[in-house]
């Protein structure tokens, strides 16, 4: 709390405090507090009070030592400050307000301090850029200016903003040590590069603020658009000779028989011949030549149990890809490659709202046909589980309309039963056989 405004100011006595806290003065103190906090805590300007009631008019008349008779009053803050000092209150407006409520906040000073902090962030960033190889990069100044205008760093606290932009400058300087945007080092592992910049192998993981800033710099250096999805982000990293993690995520497949003539395609075909499922990494997908027979129909399922059952059956020959509950980058990369090779798709997933949402995504992206995923299929399976006495799972969550069948969502809402893919397993295996 602020001390007295002048050495001779003393806190108001009990009688004066009782008068100041009268309900009729509440609106005055609120309005005066707002005005002072905007004015650098100086008692200047006026406040206007409207729709005054009798209690307020009486209290204001006593405080200001002049009659307030109308329903509106305009009070000059310098006059109010002088009146308070000369009265039994014995102190100025700012000190009075702090006695009556919480400490005043000099909002102008707060804004000025925040602006100064933001200015220091960018002066530090520019100095860091000038101290590295980015000083010679023609795009680097534009990169920093775009980041500043974008406002993302302004929403961070100054320490975080300074740390992240400094790390971004250092990371880009490591990737572009000269004036040529082409990399001079063979490759960086993304985890290795992140460790160098942040101390953590996850510092440049997808979705982090640092990775977004660095990718924006790489895009400017190469004159390309900022990537809109995960595959495009991976491609941009590789453009800067940075290899993302391409081995930890896999896509589960069965009976893929590509016609390529390298050992990789031969190994995939041999596993299919022996009814063995195969997990493919992004690294393998970049090397595989996934040419397929013309118009090969690939079945896509949501749950790994379908793949396991198809492999156990031993007579399933139809190519099968499993999303494992979500269409991750590695899943979409495989399906994109198969689509480019001329394959068509049939999709089956869970009859619940997340399952419908995932099916919508696959259907829209690849024009996939529904595979036992229409309203009649759902109704049949629901009836069968009821006849067999199978415990029912309530359908919960946000409904999703199926883009391939307008009747499916209303039917699911009417029956209110969620059906996982395993409920149709025998029918799916029959189709794959």
Image (cartoon, helix red, strand yellow):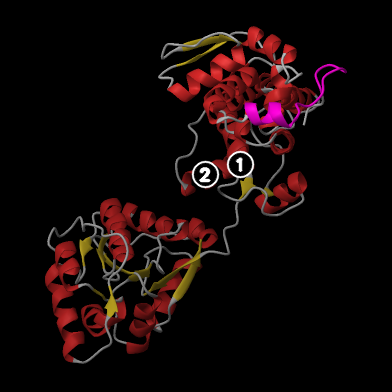
Mark 2, residue position: 233
Q: Residues within 10 Å of mark 2 (few under 14, many from 20)?
A: some
Q: Is 271 situated above or below 134?
A: below
Q: Residue 222 at what x, y percent from top left?
A: 56, 30
Q: Residue at x 42, y 11 (%)?
A: 70
Quarter of the figure with residue 246: bottom right
Q: Quadrant of residue 399?
A: bottom left
Quarter of the image where the C terminus is located: bottom left
Percent x, y for residue 282? 51, 59
Q: Can residue 104 be seen at all in this image of the molecule?
A: no
Describe residue 418's horizontal placement relative to residue 7 as left or right: left
SS at badge 2: helix
Q: Which residue is mark 1?
A: 209
Residues rendered magenta in the picture: 4-19
Residue 329 in view: yes
Spatial CA distance of label 2 from label 1 is 14 Å
Instruction: Indicate whether 379 appears above or below 102.
Output: below
Q: Is residue 236 magenta?
A: no
């Amino acid at each position: 709390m602020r001390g007295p405004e002048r050495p001779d100011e003393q806190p108001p006595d009990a009688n004066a405090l009782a008068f100041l806290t009268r309900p009729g003065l509440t609106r005055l103190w609120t309005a005066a507090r707002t005005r002072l906090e905007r004015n650098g805590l100086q008692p200047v300007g006026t406040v206007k009070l409207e729709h005054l009631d009798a209690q307020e008019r009486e209290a204001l008349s006593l405080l200001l030592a002049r009659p307030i008779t109308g329903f509106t009053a305009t009070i000059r803050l310098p006059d109010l400050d002088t009146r308070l000092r000369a009265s039994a209150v014995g102190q100025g407006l700012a000190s009075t307000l702090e006695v009556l409520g919480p400490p005043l906040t000099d909002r102008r000073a707060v804004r000025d301090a925040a602006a100064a902090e933001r200015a220091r962030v960018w002066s530090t960033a520019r100095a860091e850029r000038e101290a590295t190889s980015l000083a010679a990069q023609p795009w680097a100044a534009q990169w920093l200016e775009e980041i500043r205008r974008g406002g993302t760093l302004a929403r961070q606290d100054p320490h975080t903003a300074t740390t992240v932009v400094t790390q971004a400058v250092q990371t880009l300087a490591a990737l572009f040590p000269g004036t040529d945007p082409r990399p001079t080092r063979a490759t960086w592992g993304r985890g290795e590069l992140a460790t160098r910049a942040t101390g953590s192998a996850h510092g440049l993981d997808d979705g982090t603020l640092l990775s977004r800033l660095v990718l924006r710099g790489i895009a400017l250096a190469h004159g390309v658009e900022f990537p809109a999805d995960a595959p495009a982000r991976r491609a941009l990293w590789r453009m800067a000779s940075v290899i993302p993690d391409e081995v930890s995520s896999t896509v589960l497949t069965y009976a893929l028989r590509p016609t390529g003539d390298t050992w990789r395609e031969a190994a995939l075909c041999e596993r299919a011949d022996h009814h063995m499922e195969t997990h493919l990494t992004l690294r393998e997908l970049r090397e595989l030549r996934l040419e397929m027979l013309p118009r090969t129909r690939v079945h896509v399922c949501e749950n790994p149990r379908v793949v396991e059952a198809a492999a156990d059956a031993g007579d399933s020959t139809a190519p099968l890809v499993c999303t494992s509950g979500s269409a991750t980058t590695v899943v979409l990369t495989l399906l994109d490659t198969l689509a480019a090779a001329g394959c068509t798709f049939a999709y089956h997933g869970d009859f619940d709202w997340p399952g419908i949402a995932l099916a919508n995504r696959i259907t829209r992206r690849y024009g996939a046909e529904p595979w036992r995923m229409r309203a009649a299929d759902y109704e049949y399976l629901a009836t069968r589980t009821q006849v067999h006495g199978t415990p029912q799972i309530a359908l919960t969550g946000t409904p999703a309309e199926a883009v391939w069948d307008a009747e499916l969502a209303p039917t699911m809402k009417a029956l209110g039963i969620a059906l996982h893919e395993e409920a149709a397993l025998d029918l799916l295996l029959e189709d794959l056989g």
